[in-house]
Amino acid sequence: MTPAIDARVRLDTHPTHPSAVQAVLTGTQARVALMALEAADWSVAATNVLVLARIDHEEPYWADDAAKHLIAEGITVEITPRLQKAIKEEWTWANYPMPWCTRSEIREVSNQAHLRQVADTFDSPAKALLAFEKVHAADMRPGPAPLTDTERAAIEARSVFDVTTAKSEPSRPEPEIVPVYLADAGDHDALLDSFLDAHGEFEKWRTWTDDTTHAIHESQTLRIERVHEADPRETAWTIAAYETPVSDRMWHLTMTGATPAPVLLTLLNTLAEGDTWETAVGSPATEKTVTEATRPLIDAGWKHTVDGRWIRWETSQGDAGVQFDAFAAQRPHTTLATWTLWAGASTDRPTWAIHASPYTPAPMIAHLTGELAHGTGTRTPQQLPHLTTTPPAVAPTISAPQAARRR
């Protein structure tokens, strides 16, 4: 049957924002669809293009809700396969304070939640300002409040469709082939999503704030933690393994946000090989295992030096290296890293770094050193990472994982 309104809406995932949804309108009566979407809190980003970006990151759910209302009004709606996939995906909300609610009810509560609360009441504005100053004097400053991360992300999501800005941007230089340790970080979130799509033995869930994604192996003894908005120089990934689902962790490994995409991909693929990351408790590094883990570096001609407790392998240019701390290797409960893989000015001032605790399986380190020694990647010239002046810290202890699954 011919639709009552000559308007068509194509809903798709946003090209850059991780959870936003875009709507492209066509038809002689597209204005009708535009007004309906604006009434549902969609923002106009360009001519006949709208964007939905929310603080709770539930855009796919509300996009599906908008589609149903538009169809009911006689408007043709197309939903792309990738958005359809995001709509069907269900999250497990960890530690949700109202467990009796259904998923739909949780979203409704989130949609109607008040983000402010009354702390006190005052007889006059002057008294209120005076009380506020007593509590927050050290942080007060003139002018409007700075934009939040969510506000900045929403602005960026809308600006993607600014045709004027796009035309004025200079053409980007072609990526160049470089040693893997100099490659761009790429899109870590996309790599994680692809990994989880390909490996059903891992289930993911997220925290209430959406700042972090957790993926847990079906054995409940391997956990991946991804901090989405971490500074490129700080810890953005933590991998931890446990003997049993309720035991203390056996080993852990951390990576900073600027770690090259091929290196991250090598690690994720290694995690998919169970016999690579599983190890018995009480298996410290030995001369044999260290030799096996670093053989690719020796074969590639990296310089080998010994400085007291530290054994190092570095490129001839000194722009990347691997460090083994023999002292930390013999102390399973130390916060010091036994292994440090890095690129940049030095191990103390890296562009990116990987830190691994005692008992981290030698085969896993061997996969990473093999990638550093022989792998290549791409780098866009203007996206060269900046060197940090402070080394990233080893991530704090992660508690034992708890079972959580999506349906």
Image: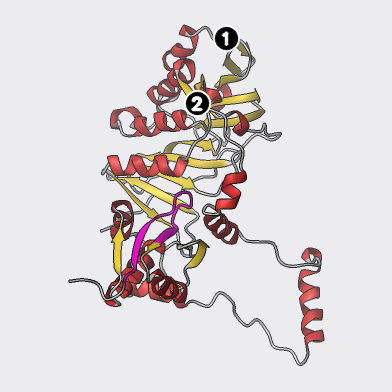
Horizontal and vertical percent for residue 45? Answer: 52, 61
Q: How is the image coloured?
A: secondary structure
Amino acid type shown at disc 1: His
Which residues are drawn in magenta?
Answer: 6-24
In the picture of the structure, the residue carrying the numbered disc 1 is 304
296 versus 395 height, above or below: above
Please, which residue is most extreme toward the left here?
Answer: 1
Mark 1 and mark 2 lie on one chain; the one further toward the N terminus is: 1
361 versus 225 height, above or below: above
- Where residue 312 sits, quadrant-wise, is top right
- Where residue 88 sits, quadrant-wise, is bottom left
CA gap, disc 1 and disc 2: 27 Å
Q: Is residue 405 left or right of residue 373?
A: left
- Disc 1: CA contacts within 10 A as few (<14), some (14-19) or many (>=20): some
Depth check, front residue: 392 or 233:
233
Secondary structure at badge 1 equals: strand
96 versus 194 height, above or below: below
Q: Residue at x 71, y 34 (%)?
A: 389
Q: Is residue 50 left or right of residue 182?
A: left
Secondary structure at badge 2 equals: strand
In the picture of the structure, the residue carrying the numbered disc 2 is 378
Horizontal and vertical percent for residue 226? Answer: 46, 46
Horizontal and vertical percent for residue 347? Answer: 63, 25
